[in-house]
Amino acid sequence: MRKPDRPERPSPFAPRAEGSRQMTAIDQGEAGTGETAATALRCKECERVGELTAAYVCEYCFGPLEVVYDMERIARAVSRERIAAGPPSLWRYRDFLPCAPADPHAGLPTGLTPLVRAPRLAEALGLGEVWVKNDTANPTHSFKDRVVSVALEKAKQLGYEVVACASTGNLANSVAAHASAHGLESYVFVPADLEEQKIVATAVYGTTLLAVGGTYDDVNRLCMELASERPWAFVNVNVRPYYAEGSKTLAFEVAEQLGWRQPDRCIVPIASGSLYTKIHRGFRELRETGLLDDGPAPVMEGSQAAGCGPVAAAYADGLDFVAPVKPDTVAKSLAIGNPADGVFALDVARETGGSITAVTEEEIVDGIELLARTTGIFTETAGGVTTAVLARLAREGRIDPSERVVVFITGDGLKTLDAVAGRVRRHPIEPTVASFEAAVGEARLIA
């Protein structure tokens, strides 16, 4: 049976004829595909560079790829005023991204989510200044809308009409929703034991949802095989270098919302490790282009569940590699046993004086409740992990009370209701004042 035609995808690392020049994103922008300062893909291992096309790994050493930018060009063009005049979405930072839409208001409005001061959380933990970056306010209620916005824009520029992903849940929601908004066909692959809330919140958009028997790592391996056989843009496989860049916008927003200041410390969840490393990179790029004053990078604290904490284990053992594990945790959105960017997360933790900490299942649920009771923000289990790590670091005296700390909450608690359902108490009463008065003295929402 003949395979369907696919968009032309030359090798990004193929030799170029003498005298030819690499087409940059600026050049592509002149051709109508969005003007940015992205210039190449570079291998994070051997540092070879190649074209801005669909690729996931280096053809020479199989290392992961990242987007390279002309930072001097960005520094000349960008300013705080230019950003402030941009759209109320992540596209206000288009100068720092690998692609940009002709109409920044098309599709689902993503980004510019609240940065919430949390004085009651800080007081409960004996800290001074704590902020919560609440990315539950995105269109599908998680930070994945950021990476998907960038990935789908680049996929369209590369000529794809079908998008797909391997997901632990939030990415599935986001790909299905954004594909529908852009009129693209979509396929999402998830572990069969995913939370029912995330299954429903994905299927409702009309995507083709494939529930795969196995862990996320099994799902991801299947998608890598399919990416070589289908003319589809797998957002976290063959367009992953562009997809990952969307995470930087969290750092850009936090800095802008703090009056163009950096936090002293960031608490970030780690699944693949990409979000953690890209937030670090985002702050670095702001310093490099003069939007932030020179100074030390924020201390980067990584957060994992003990039931799937391969990066935390490697950090604790002083290793420079991450051994895969089989996930067994309520924090399914972080349940990646073989994290693609784990070793790079180790580098960031050590470079910034941070750490990578794993917390127990009980601490995760405690973290969800602590955040809800002190801030009014209901987070999914991944946010329970970050809040629990914040609590542990505070309890162990590893955060100075004078520090400005930002906790990154990446998903809405409505996605993982089962995690806290067992702790909720109901107080049935009769429709009488006497029955109310008999019950109200002991009434508590959370036991």
Image: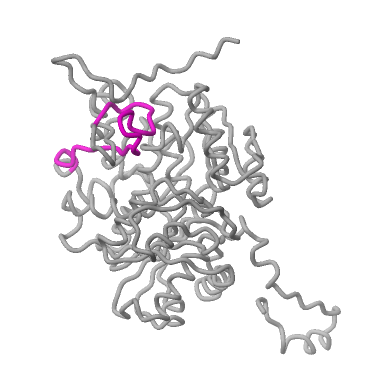
Query: On the image, which quarter does residue 391 sit in?
Result: bottom left
The total of numbered circles placed on residues is 0
Query: On the image, which quarter does residue 246 sit in?
Result: top left
Q: Position of residue 87 (x, y in %)?
A: 35, 44
Q: Quadrant of the C terminus?
A: bottom right
Q: Which residues are magenta?
A: 49-74
Residue lying at the far top of the rendered structure:
2
Left or right of 153 in this view: 412: right
- The front one of 412 and 418 is 418
Q: Position of residue 332 (x, y in %)?
A: 58, 54
Q: Residue at x 24, y 61 (%)?
A: 297
Q: Position of residue 250 (x, y in %)?
A: 37, 53
Q: Residue at x 59, y 46 (%)?
A: 215
Q: Is residue 373 magenta?
A: no
Q: Is residue 57 magenta?
A: yes
Q: Residue at x 53, y 66 (%)?
A: 384
Q: Quadrant of the N terminus?
A: top right
